[in-house]
Image (cartoon, grey):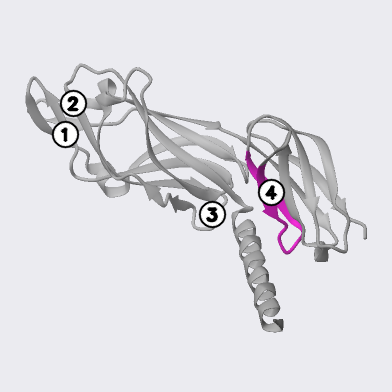
Amino acid sequence: MRFLQFFNTLWLILLFGTFVACNDEEAGNAHLVVRLTDAPADYQEVNIDIQSIEVHTSGSSSGWVELDNISEGVYNLLDLTNGLSVVLGEGEIPAGKISQIRLILGDNNTLKTEGQVHDLTTPSAQQSGLKLQMHNTLAAGITYEVLLDFDAARSVVETGSGSFNLKPVIRAIAEAQDGAIAGSVLPLEASPAVYAIQGSDTITSAFTNNNGDFLLSGLDTGSYTVGIEPADEYQEISLTDVQVSIGQVTDVGTVQLSQ
């Protein structure tokens, strides 16, 4: 019986440690989703071979960060007109200022016009990627969507020899998709679980990290109650009417618990 109690206690400690570690690792990250769309063009197909996506952020010591969830493949841009779009990739990146997004292309870039398929020459893109300038600051805990608006009509250039070059004209638009609540709880040994609640629904939850900090992300605009459930020797507390806005992290400050 004592062994079973010990095993259950150990399991809870390990589980709690895992949640704290995850919360710690993700506390300084923003979530980035990259979508692709296009304007109409007078061709039958404009096929672009997407292999990877990199983001240059001030939050990374190495500068460039590669998104780890990429839908590699050949995309016909003309399938993505009239408001249609597709997700190219997404992932967690260190929060901070992003100055560039880089699309790494493969070799299967082609153009179909008048029933004929032609290679699209993209020498610079194959070497270092298509670099798109951006000037956005990503906050930790917020999800952002970057829409790559590809202008196929202006991006395809016919040469005098009857071949075609790809000189991409792409507009990158970043928009925040949600908000977050941040704060800290003392004393550290309270080790509480923290919940974002609307009405009777718990929207999301997190544990405080080793510094007592917490981050509740992925929240829509609205009013929330932040419920704090500490270890048994400390009293629970609720913060009411915490307002969240898209693209903003609402800081509730430091909450001091009593026994």
Q: Quadrant of the N terminus?
A: bottom right
Q: Nearer the viewer, mark 3 or mark 2?
A: 2
Image location of residue 206, percent across then percent down: 68, 52
Between 19 and 35, the one nearer to me in the picture = 19
Between 199 and 154, the one nearer to me in the picture = 199
Location of residue 175 by image quarter: top right
Which residue is labeled 2 in the image? 45
Q: Quadrant of the C terminus?
A: bottom right
Instruction: Tell me if residue 140 is in the magenta stretch.
Output: no
Q: Nearer the viewer, mark 2 or mark 1?
A: 2
Identity of the residue drawn at 53% across and 35% down: 135
What separation in Å lies between label 3 and label 2 (alpha carbons)?
38 Å
Q: Nearer the viewer, mark 1 or mark 3?
A: 1
Judge whether residue 162 can be spotted in this image.
Answer: no
Earlier residue among tags 3 and 2: 2
Earlier residue among tags 4 and 3: 3
Which residue is labeled 1 in the image? 110
Image location of residue 134, percent across then percent down: 49, 35
What separation in Å lies between label 2 and label 1 (alpha carbons)?
8 Å
Q: Amino acid at mark 4?
A: Leu
Which residue is labeled 3 in the image? 60
Q: Amino acid at mark 2?
A: Glu
Is residue 229 positioned above or below 219 on the image?
below
Between 243 and 97, the one nearer to me in the picture = 243
Earlier residue among tags 2 and 4: 2
Which residue is labeled 4 in the image? 215
What separation in Å lies between label 1 and label 3 (alpha carbons)?
35 Å
Q: Amino acid at mark 1?
A: Thr
